[in-house]
Image (cartoon, grey):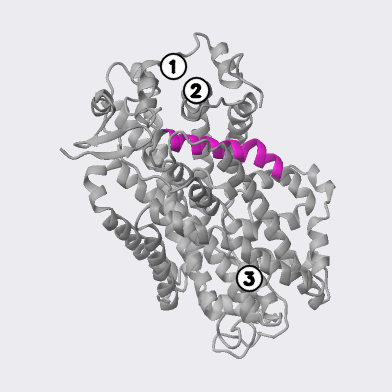
Amino acid sequence: MELESLDSENSAFIENGQVIGINGELGKKAGKDGERKTERDNWGSRMEFLLAIIGFTVGIGSIWRFPILCARNGGGAFLIPFFFFMITCGGPLYYLEVCLGQFTGQSAGAAFEFCPLFRGIGFLMVMISFDILWYYVSIMGWIQYYFVQSFQSELPWSTCGNWWNTENCREGTFLTTSGVNDSVIVNSSLLYNISSNATSSGILTSPANEFWLYNVLRKSDGLESMGAIQWHLVLSNFVGWAIVVAALIKGVKSLGKVVYVTATAPYVLLTVLLIRGLMLDGAVDGVIWYITPDFEKLASPQVWLEAAIQVFYSLGPTYGGVITMASHNKFHQKSIVETTICVASDAFTAFYAGLVVFTCMGFMAKEAGTTVEAVAKASGPGLAFVAYPEAISRMPLPQLWAALFFFMLITVAFDSTFGMFETVTGALLDVYPKQLLPRKYFVLIGTALLLFLLSLPLTMNGGIFLFQLSDWYISAFALLFGSALECIMVTWIYGADRFAKDIELMTGRQVSKILRIFWCVVMTGFLSIAFLITLATYTAPNYGDGYVYQPYSLAIGVAMSVIPFIPIVVIMVKEIVNAEGSFLKRIVSLLSPSKKWGPIDHQAREIYESKPYRYEDTLCKRIRANVLGDKSTSWF
């Protein structure tokens, strides 16, 4: 008989695949109640978990989307609604997902056994991460390609006369316009639409704009002309996936070491770029314009909606990454500290990146003899791949600053990828532990290879059109719907009060009344309203100044948006068919936790089962318990 230590603090062991407590009783219960994953790697320290979730949360959108939102929504005044929604919606939702993952010790795909009827939401999260990984790798490829090109003796996007340039290219010309319809409800943090009509209409264009269009993308005229595979992008994508697999090959053990570099490097590099930017002529003008508030903008509901949506996409709930990474925490860890630091870091990074960006915007405005506002509006979605590289090309030692800038984007992009990839592979390992855990390396390599092969169409001449279509449809509906459903499931079906008791069992601290109010009222209400607004105001995408997607393309996009919902429907039907009793009894039973639900810790599970939660006998009392708790519940 071979015994393996599972948790030295709680003296648990694994015997023949079952958890055995001190007296052996709990292992029998676990085996009888359903197959639960009994062994799970933990982070080496709380610092590793903190850096991992900061790296996952602080994405590319924090670097280049937030500054542009500030530019068009009142400058410093935009910070007011942004921080308001970060505190009342973003932070509470983030903490909810951290607690859910830590309590169950399961990845997103297996963490929703408290409501079997809707447990398919876990696989909705997995599908969202899988779909986004499919096209997100293209951004990593573009960034890596720019990074390599930064080491040339002369930056290739700083001059005309190259094989990719047109006769309209003029050095010193500032043109990074974008005609894309920038809807606030799409995941526009992936900024990629640059005007291409300028080069075909005789308008002068900059070398940076043409390098992006005709060297990096080598774009065709539309989705109907996909063209050939561009091998420089294929190679960049392959290298990206190789790095991801290498970082995750040992699970959280290896990832926990990698994030010490990838999560901290962006802040060091942003600081270096900020110091350099402040030395540029006109930089102070850019910073002043960025932080000067226009309070009249706050009267517009659109500004508040954009701030709320930015908070939502910036923190990244419903991707499954937060739940999955929290599932590797030690059970009794008080993760409110890490959650608060992570949410604050995300908000700080967005603001800090804005300072870096607008030092360059001020410099470019000075160079072009125009206003900072004009430069900011012209830069638009082309900020990362046209506007900022163009500004760098005009600095002394441009190769150094270009390499630092794109290396910073590489670290940010990979951190987000790690979390989503771990969500996908973690779900496979949690659902099929006996079959796949012994073959974990093959699961990682096979999943990465599959995503790499599926992404080949994105490397073709028309790949950018497929990229935009994917991003436009995949992320909008499923993310908002998933978050709204998750909040309703936890706070009203399972019950915020019952979940608060679970958290108290896990961490030893109560959930305050103010946090319950945020969960049950503010957060749930906002996400539901935001989803309805999304359905009511959603528009078809276009690219640049003139390309319009054909009806069949839009049909493909709609099909992409529907795919993540399929697991919810399929699992719901399966659960109803397999349940017993009348239809109504089946529904009621499936809204109650399954036997697999409970804390991953064996001692906590024993307490959990010995003292089952009892719901209030009337609806009003239950609502009050969810929102305000009992007499012992504090406000803060």
The image quarter in which residue 4 lies: top left
Of the numbered discs 1 and 3, the one sitting upstream in the chain is 3
Residue wearing tag 2: 501
**Disc 1 residue type (three-letter):** Tyr
Q: Please tell me which residue is depicted at 83% across the width and 66% down the height of the picture.
A: 285
Q: Residue 613 carries which label?
A: 1
Rate crowding at label 2 as few (under 14), some (14 to 19) or many (20 or more) other CA atoms within 10 Å.
some
Of the numbered discs 2 and 1, the one sitting upstream in the chain is 2
**Quadrant of the snapshot with the N terminus:** top left
**Disc 3 residue type (three-letter):** Ser
The answer to which of 243 and 307 lies nearer the viewer is 243
Residues rendered magenta in the picture: 83-103
- CB atoms of marks 2 and 1 within 8 Å: yes
Residue wearing tag 3: 195
Task: Report x, y in % for residue 207.
Answer: 64, 82
Residue 40 relative to residue 206: left or right: left
* Distance between mark 1 and mark 3 Cα atoms: 59 Å
Task: Report x, y in % for residue 230.
Answer: 43, 76
**Quadrant of the snapshot with the C terminus:** top right
Task: Report x, y in % for residue 458.
Answer: 44, 67
The answer to which of 476 and 555 lies nearer the viewer is 476
Of the numbered discs 3 and 2, the one sitting upstream in the chain is 3
* Distance between mark 2 and mark 1 Cα atoms: 8 Å
- CB atoms of marks 3 and 2 within 8 Å: no
Q: Please tell me which residue is depicted at 39% across the width and 42% down the height of the picture.
A: 107
Tag count in the figure? Answer: 3
